[in-house]
Image (cartoon, rainbow, N blue to C red):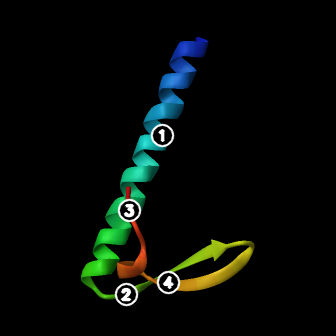
């Protein structure tokens, strides 16, 4: 695998993870649910509707 192929694969994986996170947030917003995340090294529960998406 060349360096260019490796970098393209990493880009595709990163894009896929971002898409999955966006979909999770949207679904959780529709269900008016919470997500559990790490914030400053602490585990916290956050309402999905309070999260800002890019």
Per the image, label 2 sits on a secondary structure element best described as loop
Question: Going from the N terminus, do you reach mark 2 or mark 4 first?
Answer: 2
Q: Quadrant of the C terminus?
A: bottom left
Per the image, label 4 sits on a secondary structure element best described as strand
Q: Which mark is residue 28?
A: none
Q: Can residue 1 be spotted in the picture?
A: no
Q: CA distance from mark 4 to mark 1?
A: 26 Å
Residue in the image at 42% along x and 73% along y: 51
Question: Going from the N terminus, do you reach mark 1 or mark 2 first?
Answer: 1
Q: Is residue 44 left or right of residue 24?
A: right
Q: Can residue 54 be spotted in the picture?
A: yes
Question: Going from the N terminus, do you reach mark 4 or mark 3 first?
Answer: 4
Tag 2 residue: 33
Question: Going from the N terminus, do you reach mark 3 or mark 1 first?
Answer: 1
In the displayed structure, 27 sits above or below 17; it is below
Which is more foreground, mark 2 or mark 4? 4
């Amino acid at each position: 695998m060349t360096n260019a192929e490796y970098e393209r694969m990493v880009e595709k994986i990163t894009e896929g993870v971002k898409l999955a996170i966006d979909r999770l947030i949207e679904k959780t917003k529709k269900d008016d649910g919470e997500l559990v995340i790490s914030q400053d090294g602490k585990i916290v529960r956050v309402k999905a509707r309070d999260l800002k998406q890019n």
